[in-house]
Image (cartoon, rainbow, N blue to C red):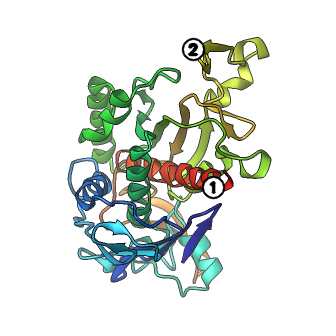
Amino acid sequence: MSSIYHGRLTVSIFGQSHAPGIGVTVDGLPAGETVDLEDLQAFLARRAPGGNAWSTPRKEGDLPEFLSGLADGKTCGAPLAAVIRNTNTRSKDYSNLKDVPRPGHADYTAQMKYGGFQDVAGGGHFSGRLTASLCIAGGICKQILARRGIFVGAHIAAIGGIPDTPFDPVNVDKETLLAPGGKLFPVTDDRAGERMQEAIAAARADLDSLGGAIECAVIGLPVGLGDPMLDGMENRIARLIFAIPAVKGVEFGAGFQVANLRGSQNNDPFYMDGDRVKTRTNHAGGILGGITNGMPLVFRAAVKPTPSIGQEQDSVSLSRREDTKLVIHGRHDPCIVPRAVPCVEAAAAIAVYDALLEQERER
């Protein structure tokens, strides 16, 4: 079981890609919070496989079964526990991966760490399949935050070098923020999305894959969430974002571009908007000193290309200790990015809601 604890919430994820099921427990949710199961199912459907040309053909309903934590549609104070049954598995496609690991995948490191006892079917507990569990916890946190006027949304920032129109880091509104989540292909500019889909199709035809980036924003945040240094909002969010197996980098606000700026360019000037303090730019991404400043919290996550591709690749036979060739079988996404968008939202929502609960407890 993989667990994370910050201030109030403990989130634990369990299961394997081809095991009977996967699931999540969330401890620390206040009692009395309504959970709209239809809304949660719609959120999970955004991540679910098998619904389009850019995802794996594996079809899973991703229907969560709640074992505890809910009574009459509300949290009841007990730890929330939910499972999703795996119903469409083909484990024979992975039988050789203990001996011949996939380049770019965790097969080799898992073999070294677990001595050959790991479950290789579908990637075992290293699989992106387990992000469905993350989305259960994050989907519930999103609902609770929305009732407090805090909204989390994301879109595909780029795929294969093709950019989408970014959120306005200063003035992104609720409608613009949430619009991509209502689309089959979650972008702000549908013409850019069409070019991305063409690029994915071309990569798939070449038995290859594509990576990309996801931009996420949180609006309606109060000033003061988070703590300096080791428990800042960047730290909290990044730790959860890296729970998404394909993520290789996270940047906040202007991110790595700040390295090319002078202080006079990077600093966000303050001004008074009525009785509120705002900034005219948002290179900080809504966070100063690890603490939210009331501006939109904006970050981006870099997602690697799917390592399981159909082309012949160089690998090794661990039993024979010699070089060999590998052709991967099975059902895999030619691009993980579109299905990872709700996962990024889920991770951000958990981190933000946990920080909000911590602030409320301190007051």
**Residue 209 appears anywhere in the view:** no
At x 44% / y 67%, what residue is drawn? 31
The quadrant in which residue 49 appears is: bottom left
- Residue 273, numbered circle: 2
Figure label count: 2
Between residue 203 and residue 1, name the one nearer to us: 1
Between residue 86 and residue 80, name the one nearer to us: 80
Quarter in which the N terminus is drawn: bottom right
* Circle 1 Cα neighbour tier, 10 Å, few/some/many (<14 / 14–19 / ≥20): some
Residue, disc 1: 358
Figure check: 95 above or below 312: below
Residue 157, how many percent across, how many down? 44, 33
Residue 92, how many percent across, how many down? 32, 80
Q: Mark 2: which amino acid? A: Asp
* Circle 2 Cα neighbour tier, 10 Å, few/some/many (<14 / 14–19 / ≥20): few
Mark 2: secondary structure = strand
